[in-house]
Image: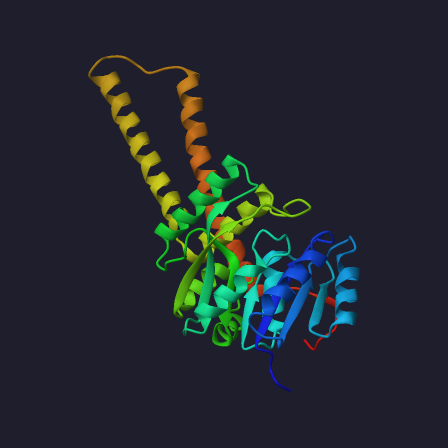
Amino acid sequence: MNKPTLSIIVPVYHEEQNIPLLHSRLLTAMKLISDDFEIIWVNDGSSDNSLFLIKELAAADKRNKYISFTRNFGHQMALMAGLEACSGKAAVMIDCDLQDPPELIPELWEQYEKGFKVVYARRRQRKGENIVRKFAIRLFYRLLHRTTRIRIPVDTGDFRLIDRKVIDALKSMPEQHKYLRGQIAWLGFSQIAVSYNRDGRFAGKSKYGWIRLFRLAMDGFTGFSNLPLKLASLGGFLVSLVAFIIILYALYSKFIMGNVISGWTSLIISTMFIGGIQLISIGIIGEYISRINSDVRKRPLYMVEEANLDL
């Protein structure tokens, strides 16, 4: 069986309003590349009509394929399922919310044909997001970029085109807590960026709330940076230094100045401060241990309830 030229992987979670338009725009974009392609829709436990619409597309056009999870396993797992199932010579990962324009795919393909193994889309602007969210995301990308031994591109998400060699390499990486954009950067294949302006959502609400964004950020830091551990060590050192200075001051006050430091306030504040630093440090170490524990258990990344392709 001949492999398709390109696989398009679309994670779906409660996107019934966006699926028809995204599909139409994908077909239009692919006319500039090839008719030999597949679209892999990964239903990540949606409870709306998303799966029904995907099945209708698959029935009308065999190039539409789908995987449906037993529950919501998360965006990164949905992308990984699509990568493991795709058979194209290259693959594009794109979200279903239409913030990333399908019309950019031909431009990604143009750079891919020049020999680049990874062509990622870099955002110039982010429409439809508030200032606080934009600032937090911008700060995270730059902190991660500066604190890792590898260079993870800033202002980029998972919207990118990757070669089959990259796909196969990703499939061999066993981490349970996936951060695909970091893993792809770690692999070190030839990469280039294509800039674009990101639109707001066409319909529905973002599934990446503050909690999910925080979890993704933790996966990025714990998977590719030792900064949290270094901060915990630095915090412990600073607290010890402050405590030592306080001890010297207390001895000086008692034996030189003849004053005895008294009062519960200073004692309680010092105890709470030191205790807070200890709890934060333990929590940071616990995050790393938790990820080690997940990798040791080696549970499946996701469970498939139904699909129309071989897995």
Q: Is residue 131 above or below residue 103?
A: above
| Residue 135: x %, y % from top left | 46, 39
Q: Where residue 283 sits: x, y (%)?
A: 49, 44
Q: Quadrant of residue 251?
A: top left
Mark yes or no: residue 72 visible: no
What's the residue at 45%, 34% (across, down)?
A: 275
Q: Is residue 299 left or right of residue 292?
A: right
Report x, y in % for residue 287. 51, 50
- Residue at position x 62%, y 75% from top? 35
The residue nearer to you, when weighing 222 against 86, is 86
In the image, farthest residue toward the left: 256
Q: Residue 215 versus residue 129: which sits nearer the camera?
A: 129
Say which residue appears at 40% left-offset and 26% top-offset. Answer: 270
Q: Quadrant of the C terminus?
A: bottom right
Q: Quadrant of residue 116?
A: bottom left
Quadrant of the rendering where the N terminus is positioned: bottom right
